[in-house]
Image: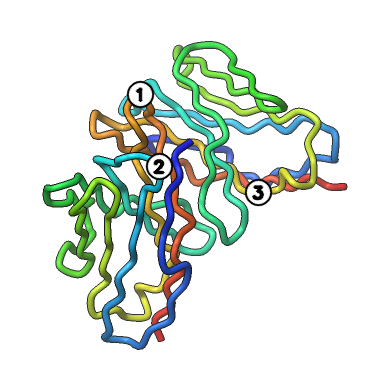
């Protein structure tokens, strides 16, 4: 089993809709999780971090963590064409502050 | 978040030459930096973890004699790709472990290496 698995997509949503991105993780992953956005040809940019069970909201983004189900998700409300990118889920790995990344989900927001 | 710079942003070199990539943390002292490689349409692959003043820890399958990492100061880590070959062509990205209290990693803008 991969340490972090994402629904690979691609995912297309119309402008203004809610985009839902999902990720599951293995027992090896510690209890810190991160969502990164990566535009084509660019490096990843941190969007959200979440450490505790439940929801964390930041603007149009909401991260959800369910430790019992080993599941973390990212919701993007009122999706905009500028949100079109690959979204990477990452989990902390061990005490060396390493991260393990999912394979990414490519999101396209259609105008 | 922390600001990380990387230089050069792109480089083209001939097979057999060496290329050095610099990664700087601009607004804090980074005791730990990470080097990743990303091939087209693939996810990030961690190459090595470098700690200031000590030897880097390489991931399995990464040749430490080919990918030389130096982290001589709290603001600078370098990756040297020695005797580069076309299969080394990739997007190399460094990341900083962030200041105390942050578990996130903050990425530099990346270096696109093309070996002819």
1 vs 2, front mark: 2
Mark 2, secondary structure of its residue: loop
Residue that appears at 64% across and 23% down: A58
Residue B87, placed above or below residue B96: below
Nearest to viewer (mark 3 / mark 2): 2
Question: Which quarter of the figure has residue A17?
Answer: top right
Badge 1 element: loop
Residue B48 placement (x, y as % from top left): 25, 51
| Near-viewer residue (A18 or A9) | A18
User: Which residue is found at the position 43% from the left and 55% from the top?
Assistant: B5
Residue B107 in picture, x, y percent from top left: 44, 47
Quarter of the picture containing the C terminus of chain B is bottom left
Q: Residue beneath label 3, please?
A: A85
The residue beneath circle 2 is: B27
| In the image: residue B40, left or right of residue B6 | right
Q: Which residue is mark 1?
A: B101
Image quadrant in which you'd find residue B61: bottom left
Q: Where in the figure is residue A74, as x and y percent of width and height? A: 62, 28
The chain that hosts pointer 1 is B
Horizontal relation, residue B24 to residue A63: left or right: left
Q: Position of residue B60 (x, y in %)?
A: 21, 52
Q: Is residue A85 above or below residue B90?
A: above
Height in image: B13 above or below B70?
below
Label 2, residues with CA under 10 Å away: few <14, some 14-19, many ≥20: few
The numbered disc on residue B55 is none
Q: Chain of mark 3?
A: A
């Amino acid at each position: 089993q991969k340490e972090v698995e994402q629904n690979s997509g691609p995912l297309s949503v119309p402008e203004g809709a809610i985009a839902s991105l999902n990720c599951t993780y293995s027992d090896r992953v510690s209890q810190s999780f991160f969502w990164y956005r990566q535009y084509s040809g660019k490096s990843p940019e941190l969007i959200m971090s979440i450490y505790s069970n439940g929801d964390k909201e930041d603007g149009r983004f909401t991260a959800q963590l369910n430790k019992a189900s080993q599941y973390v998700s990212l919701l993007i409300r009122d999706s905009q064409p500028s949100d079109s990118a690959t979204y990477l889920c990452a989990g902390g790995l061990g005490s060396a502050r390493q991260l393990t990344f999912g394979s990414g989900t490519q999101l396209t927001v259609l105008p | 978040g922390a600001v990380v710079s990387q230089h050069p942003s792109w480089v083209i070199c001939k097979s057999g030459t060496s290329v050095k990539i610099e990664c700087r943390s601009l607004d804090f002292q980074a005791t730990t930096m990470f080097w990743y490689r990303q091939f087209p349409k693939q996810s990030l692959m961690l190459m090595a973890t470098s700690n200031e003043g000590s030897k880097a820890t390489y991931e399995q399958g990464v040749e430490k004699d080919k990918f030389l990492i130096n982290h001589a100061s709290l603001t600078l880590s370098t990756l040297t790709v020695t005797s580069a070959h076309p299969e080394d062509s990739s997007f190399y990205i460094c990341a900083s472990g962030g200041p105390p209290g942050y578990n996130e990693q903050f990425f530099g803008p990346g270096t696109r290496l093309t070996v002819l």
